[in-house]
Amino acid sequence: MFDLTKPLEINWELNNRCNLMCPQCGRNEIKDGKLQWRKWANGNPSQRLNDTDNSLETFKTAYNNIGYPVRVIRFQGHVSENILSKDFLPICKFLREETDTSIHVSTHGSANTIEWWEKLGNVFSGDPRSIVFFSLDGVGQESLENYRVGAGYDKVIANAQSFIRGGGKAIWRMIIFKHNQHQVDEARELARELGFWEFVEVHTNRRINMDKEFEYKGKKYILENQDISPEWNEAIKKNQNYKEGTDIECKAIKENQFYVDYLNRVWACYYIPNMKTLIKEKDWYSEYFFKKDSLLNKTLDEILQDSFYDDLQKSWSCDALSYCKKFCSKKIGANRGFKWSMNEDSEEKQNKYLKDHSGKHIQRTKDYV
Ligand SMILES: C[S@@+](CC[C@H](N)C(=O)[O-])C[C@H]1O[C@@H](n2cnc3c(N)ncnc32)[C@H](O)[C@@H]1O
Ligand code: SF4
């Protein structure tokens, strides 16, 4: 399925930990008006959240079992906040010092000390392809915690500044909701002042738990959808009919990017690991899910021989997984939409970013808008 003659990309989650409660995160659900952990967040009710981490040693074993050049690891994941892994710093050090793999991190930034962040900046310095994306969906405490429930705005800003001071390259990535749509220019300006390398606006494809009141720790919240991009909202409306999407163009193949979950199991992509609904949909999915194979006991070559990868590819031309239709149908699939700041002096940076990293994000936006 993947082109092993070309450098690979991996979206990797080191743990199933997080200290925040974002209402649209796959970790969480709203039940009886209360925001809480989702019972099936791991795809398996007997597996709890916040109970698993990887050490430098297990990470190295898994990494070495890949056996092919890896261009970039994206520490992002479905149920993880990777900076909460106790060995995150040594893991990044290992990658920077002993491999040619660059590092991307997606983080809420609301944990660890400024000293820790400065050290991370030191580790990242010198590699323009290694970047931390700060998920900062608002300016000021009140705005930020509308979505990033439990985050401390001042803490995130101090941590980001410390990382930048240490020599790291940081991007402020802001998901646009109603509560922050009036702050985009302010955030972009602040990002510039604080030394972020870039500011990125993101439109979300998620509609779950929007416009629905909920309570968390005695406080009431409501998350509302933005109304500054009707084109995007229209595209997402079309995407709600994703079951009709039959024209699958697999993004994982296009990006040569697979997924490693916190148990070091390999999945074809970011969209399908450990999904309860998919276990019910297809026997071949369920079979793969319940196997114990991982990069701790098998090589990537051995894992990719599993019939799961054939079944998945065959399914695209007859009866695809619902998530393949939802995200990878050419006509109605929807991913996160990216709008980039298009001011003059950032054009060069954008071109560089596109070349170095992932032009796909911009193309996606052009597809949908
Ligand atoms: C589950 S998070 C894990 C990484 C990290 N905890 C974070 O929040 O950045 C995976 C990715 O989903 C993004 N994400 C969270 N909520 C989102 C939403 N409502 N719409 C689009 N992306 C979202 C995060 O920003 C992150 O890039
Ligand atoms: S910070 Fe990331 S992992 Fe944590 S709840 Fe929010 S989206 Fe999920």
Image (cartoon, rainbow, N blue to C red):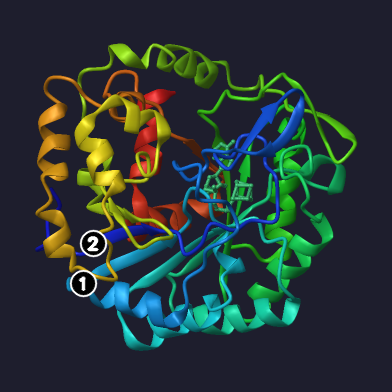
Relative horizontal placement of residue 209, taking residue 158 as reference (left or right): left
Residue 98 percent across, percent down from the top left: 34, 87
Relative horizontal placement of residue 317, taking residue 167 as reference (left or right): left
Name the residue type under label 2: Leu
User: Marks 2 and 1, how far apart in space?
Assistant: 6 Å
* Disc 2 crowd, CA 10 A, few/some/many (<14, 14-19, 20+): many
Q: Residue at x 20, y 64 (%)?
A: 7
Q: Residue furthest front?
A: 46
Q: Residue at x 31, y 72 (%)?
A: 62
Q: Nearer the viewer, residue 346 or 339?
A: 339
Regarding mark 2 in the picture, which secondary structure is present there? strand
* Disc 1 crowd, CA 10 A, few/some/many (<14, 14-19, 20+): some
Disc number placed over residue 69 in the picture, else none: 1
Residue 338 appears in the figure = yes
Regarding mark 1 in the picture, which secondary structure is present there? loop
Q: Residue at x 45, y 52 (%)?
A: 350
Q: Earlier in the sequence, mark 2 or mark 1?
A: 2
Disc number placed over residue 8 in the picture, else none: 2
- Ligand 1 located in image quadrant: top right
Give residue 223's quadrant in the image.
top right
Residue 22 percent across, percent down from the top left: 67, 41
Relative horizontal placement of residue 225, taking residue 349 as reference (left or right): right
Residue 80 percent across, percent down from the top left: 54, 55
Residue 157 percent across, percent down from the top left: 76, 62
Residue 6 appears in the figure = no
Q: In the rendered structure, are the residues bearing label 2 and label 1 in contact, judged by CB atoms less than 8 Å apart?
A: yes
Q: Is mark 1 within 8 Å of ligand 1?
A: no
Q: Nearer the viewer, residue 53 or 320?
A: 53
